[in-house]
Image (cartoon, grey):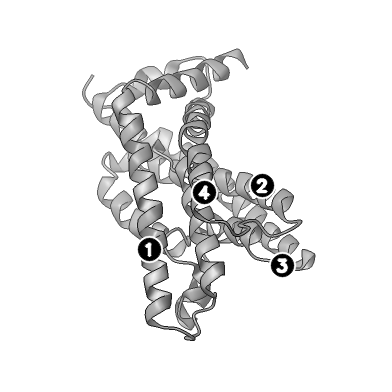
């Protein structure tokens, strides 16, 4: 257990190496939130009364919570594994007396914790001053936090699967760029999934992406029946199990295909 805590500390220290980068990241997230707020206000002002799946207040609450959650949900596992493989350092990582996947998760968790403190809390404060209406649906915060935790694990396993594919693809950044764009769109990080056209909404219902942002953000911001909340949590848990099993398969196959370069 001590080893994993040490890797969490490494993840924290790596993120704090450049203080200017921390301030730049915080400023960029505040600007992004402001741009989202202004964009959606303008869209609703120019199309009053038009049916979009969510009304103005629901949309603003959605994008606020989605932006705040994204500050610590972001995962750099794919890039890190690619770097380790291309440098040849992956060989040293694999022979260490610690599970490779658990080590990656520990570093990622440490990074997420410091991001939560540095970015999430300040964004909540800024939002409190700028937006005076309630953001969280009454009585749903507990279920929302559970959903965020499950979504965090889904995001990690999804990223880990893509990252481990580099064991035999060597370079996965082209695939990662394609999947990142699809993921950002379909997860509900950019646009609420309730606003998707009918066909895209039906297709997305069979994909894991909405379980990362759309479900937890909706549970937190939109009043729902408890039965509906539990059904959405069940969807997340199903995808969590599926992605975990895919991780095991990818790890088992990847170790046999790995070709170490550089070093």
Element type where label 1 sits in the image = helix
Q: Position of residue 195 (x, y in %)?
A: 48, 75
Residue 153 visible in rendering: yes
Q: Which residue is mark 4?
A: 129
Q: Compared with residue 29, is residue 204 higher up or lower down, i.e. above or below?
A: below
First-in-chain label (1 vs 4): 1
Q: Which residue is mark 2?
A: 145
First-in-chain label (4 vs 3): 4
In the rendered structure, are the residues bearing label 2 and label 1 in contact, judged by CB atoms less than 8 Å apart?
no
Element type where label 3 sits in the image = loop
Instruction: Write down the quadrant of residue 229 in the picture.
Output: bottom right
Q: Which residue is mark 3?
A: 224
Label ID, residue 119: none
- Residue at (60%, 60%) from the top-left corner? 133
First-in-chain label (4 vs 2): 4
In the rendered structure, are the residues bearing label 4 and label 2 in contact, judged by CB atoms less than 8 Å apart?
no
Q: Which residue is mark 1?
A: 38
Question: For the residues marked 4 and 2, what is the alpha-carbon distance in whole angstroms?
Answer: 23 Å
Q: Nearer the viewer, residue 153 or 137?
A: 137
């Amino acid at each position: 257990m001590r080893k994993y805590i040490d890797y969490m500390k490494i993840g924290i220290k790596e993120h704090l190496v450049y203080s200017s980068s921390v301030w730049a990241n915080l400023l960029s997230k505040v600007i992004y939130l402001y741009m989202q707020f202004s964009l959606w206000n303008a869209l609703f002002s120019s199309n009053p009364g038009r049916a979009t799946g969510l009304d103005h207040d629901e949309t603003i609450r959605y994008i606020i919570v989605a932006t705040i959650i994204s500050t610590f949900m972001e995962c750099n596992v794919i890039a890190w594994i690619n770097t380790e493989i291309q440098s040849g350092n992956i060989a040293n990582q694999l022979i260490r007396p610690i599970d490779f996947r658990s080590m990656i998760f520990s570093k990622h968790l440490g990074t997420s914790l410091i991001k939560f403190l540095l970015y999430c809390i300040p964004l909540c404060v800024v939002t409190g001053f700028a937006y005076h209406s309630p953001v969280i649906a009454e009585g749903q915060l507990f279920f929302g936090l559970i959903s965020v935790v499950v979504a965090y694990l889904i995001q990690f396993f999804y990223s880990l699967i893509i990252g481990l594919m580099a064991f035999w693809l060597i370079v996965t950044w082209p695939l990662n760029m394609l999947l990142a764009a699809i993921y950002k769109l379909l997860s509900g990080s950019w646009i609420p999934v309730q606003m998707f056209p009918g066909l895209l909404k039906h297709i997305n219902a069979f994909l894991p992406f909405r379980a990362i942002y759309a479900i937890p953000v909706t549970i937190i911001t939109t009043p729902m029946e408890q039965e509906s909340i539990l059904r959405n949590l069940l969807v997340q848990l199903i995808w969590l199990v599926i992605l975990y099993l895919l991780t095991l398969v990818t790890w088992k196959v990847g170790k046999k295909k790995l070709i170490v370069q550089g070093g």
